[in-house]
């Protein structure tokens, strides 16, 4: 158990309030390396907030977060940033710089460790970074589109570039917040298959927020369900029942 | 669709709204009255235009053919066009630092006092017409192109500052967030996510303002800031309408060239 968690993600007792309202009420979440976990839950149940607390886009009120074996508790400044860098995030809105090439976007994931003199413009990026980024693009199957403008790629291709950017960051933990919600079904399947491969073949710990239980059942190893900021369901993907789904979305679709 | 059963004859519920025909009538009457008053205030009279048609005919008869004497008319006019262009160019580029500063300070979501002060400065600079600024600067530096440049700098700083701060407020913070998650420092985030998103729209607005400022510098020439506007003013005073026609043709060429150039570059910028 512990050896597994040395490279994965472990969250204990995560709490977060916005304006006096508790959005996360003590969330425990473990994602082992080589595992793809799907997070399900109605709108507003706290899925995005949980992921944003892990990567530092939101600040948790309480709880412990361990990323790739390092606890973030008590860390600050450069140490905290370095520990957090082991976790990357992919967004529904993709968030690429549309005017830059796919390769330059991927490179941007790996600039954290560089001096400013080598990182303020793509022409300054060192060759090792470009080669590493090229390998990441190749991993997502887009090596041939390296010099295309990101904005000219299809939605599915853009999301795969965003995944490559996360790989270029050197992440061992990959979080994805509804990465396929804006994609057509074929592209969604392709991106989900890529995320599953990264877990199963490359040994990343992958957590994906999904709003389609069917996709979760198809691609995930384990499902976790959030209701009002609490984990109320944790089951192997194969065992997800219709009643479970109904309970998760009761407030929303009832 | 065929499977869907609908209830027949469902009546449309009445909208609970005050009768508004009365309001429409009142608004139309007020607008009509305003136009009658405005016509009186401007001595609007189609009759005067018809009665005076031969004045225009005389003018056109004298204006054509345009006088194309190279040494006396065309060459000085081309030089004056370059001065007009130069006023517009300097007035635009030299206002960039001030506009950028005002735009950044005037972005929503920063210090509210700084925001208000910067917004007020921009509103003031926008509200004062460039011609008024020119007349003020003439008292300091005398008649001539320099006063025109100073006037354009002031007015353009306000207008471009406002346009830029709106453009900067609109950019999406997503790509910046993505780089922050990747551990990038703030300077790296700005260089690799914020600037690539915002610079093209700032440059586009800059070109648009260059276009506008060249035309404004023409008008400033009429009130003494030099350039082709000044020559146009002189030719009118001397009743040299054939010379005036040449000037107007050259101005047309200048304006269209600047317009095409800035439109072309802006199109390249937007993908
Ligand atoms: N920055 C914020 N400020 C205030 N409330 C927020 C903020 N972010 C999220 N919330 C609230 O927290 C709750 C959970 O949001 P979120 O984590 O986005 O849910 P989910 O991703 O499961 O749909 C929602 O009620 C939302 O309104
Ligand atoms: Mg969400």
Image (cartoon, grey):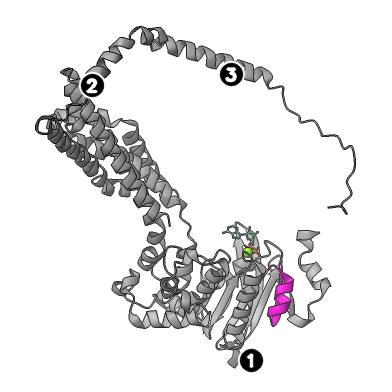
Task: Answer above or below: position of A167 versus B154.
Answer: below
Q: Distance between the residues labelled 1 and 2?
A: 95 Å
Q: Does A149 appear in magenta?
A: no
For the view shown, which residue lies furthest in the front direction? B65
Q: Is the residue under label 2 in contact with that under label 3 (CB below 8 Å)?
A: no
Mark 3 and mark 2 on one chain? yes
Task: Answer above or below: position of A90 versus B124.
Answer: below
Mark 1 and mark 3 on one chain? no
Magenta stretch: give its range. Answer: A211-227
Q: Name the residue under label 1.
A: A1
Q: Residue at x 28, y 34 (%)?
A: B252
Q: Is the residue under label 2 in contact with that under label 1 (CB below 8 Å)?
A: no
Q: Where on the image, by quarter, is ligand 2? A: bottom right
Task: Say few, some or many: other residues with alpha carbon within 10 Å of mark 2 (under 14 / 14 to 19 / 20 or more).
Answer: some
Q: Which chain carries label 1?
A: A
Task: Say few, some or many: other residues with alpha carbon within 10 Å of mark 1 (under 14 / 14 to 19 / 20 or more).
Answer: few
Q: Distance between the residues labelled 3 and 2?
A: 46 Å
Mark 1 and mark 2 on one chain? no
Q: Mark 2 lies on which chain?
A: B
Percent from the top left, x then y, of residue B21? 68, 20
Q: Which of A49 and B205 is in front in this view?
A: B205
User: In terms of secondary structure, where does tag 1 sit?
Assistant: loop
Task: Say few, some or many: other residues with alpha carbon within 10 Å of mark 3 (under 14 / 14 to 19 / 20 or more).
Answer: few
User: In terms of secondary structure, where does tag 3 sit?
Assistant: helix
- Between disc 3 and disc 2, the foreground one is 2
Q: Can residue A224 be seen in this view?
A: no
Q: Name the residue under label 2.
A: B63
Q: Name the residue under label 3.
A: B27
Q: Can residue A118 be seen in this view?
A: yes
């Amino acid at each position: 158990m512990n050896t597994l968690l040395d490279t994965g993600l472990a969250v204990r007792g995560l709490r977060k309030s916005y304006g006096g309202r508790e959005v996360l009420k003590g969330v425990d979440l473990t994602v082992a390396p080589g595992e793809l976990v799907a997070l399900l839950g109605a709108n507003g149940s706290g899925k995005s907030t949980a992921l944003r607390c892990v990567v530092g886009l939101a600040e948790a009120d309480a709880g412990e977060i361990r990323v790739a074996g390092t606890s973030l508790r008590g860390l600050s400044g450069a140490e905290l940033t370095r520990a957090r860098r082991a976790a990357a995030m992919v967004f529904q809105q993709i968030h690429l710089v549309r005017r830059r090439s796919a390769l330059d976007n991927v490179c941007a994931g790996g600039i954290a460790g560089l001096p400013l003199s080598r990182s303020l413009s793509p022409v300054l990026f060192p060759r090792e970074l470009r080669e590493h980024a090229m390998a990441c693009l190749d991993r997502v199957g887009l090596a041939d589109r390296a010099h295309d403008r990101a904005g000219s790629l299809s939605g599915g291709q853009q999301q795969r570039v965003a995944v490559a950017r996360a790989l270029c960051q050197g992440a061992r933990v990959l979080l994805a917040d509804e990465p396929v919600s804006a994609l057509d079904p074929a592209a969604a399947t392709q991106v989900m298959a890529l995320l599953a491969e990264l877990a199963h073949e490359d040994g990343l710990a992958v957590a994906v927020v999904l709003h389609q239980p069917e996709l979760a059942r198809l691609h995930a190893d384990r499902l976790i369900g959030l209701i009002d900021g609490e984990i109320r369901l944790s089951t192997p993907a194969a065992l997800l029942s219709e009643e479970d789904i109904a309970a998760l979305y009761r407030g929303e679709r009832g | 669709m065929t499977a869907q059963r609908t209830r027949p004859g469902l009546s449309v519920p009445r909208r609970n709204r005050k009768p508004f025909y009365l309001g429409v009538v009142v608004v139309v009457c007020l607008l009509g009255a305003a136009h009658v008053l405005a016509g009186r205030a401007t001595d609007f009279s189609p009759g005067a235009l018809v009665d005076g048609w031969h004045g225009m005919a005389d003018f056109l008869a004298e204006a054509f053919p345009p006088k194309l004497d190279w040494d006396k008319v065309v060459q000085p006019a081309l030089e004056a066009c370059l001065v007009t262009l130069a006023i517009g160019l300097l007035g635009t580029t030299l206002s960039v630092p001030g506009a950028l500063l005002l735009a950044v300070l005037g972005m929503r979501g920063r210090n509210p006092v700084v925001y208000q002060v910067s917004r007020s400065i921009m509103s003031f600079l926008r509200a004062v017409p460039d011609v008024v600024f020119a007349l003020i600067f003439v008292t300091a530096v005398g008649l001539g192109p320099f006063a025109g440049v100073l006037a354009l700098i002031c007015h353009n700083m306000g207008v471009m500052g406002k346009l830029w701060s709106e453009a900067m407020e609109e950019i999406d913070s997503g790509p910046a967030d993505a780089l922050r998650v990747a551990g990038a420092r703030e300077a790296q985030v700005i260089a690799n996510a914020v600037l690539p998103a915002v610079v093209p729209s700032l440059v586009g607005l800059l070109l648009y303002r260059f276009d506008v400022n060249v035309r404004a510098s023409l008008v400033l020439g009429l009130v003494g800031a030099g350039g082709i506007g000044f020559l146009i003013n002189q030719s009118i005073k001397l009743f040299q309408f054939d010379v005036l026609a040449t000037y107007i043709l050259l101005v047309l060429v200048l304006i269209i060239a600047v317009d095409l150039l800035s439109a072309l570059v802006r199109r390249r910028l937007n993908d």
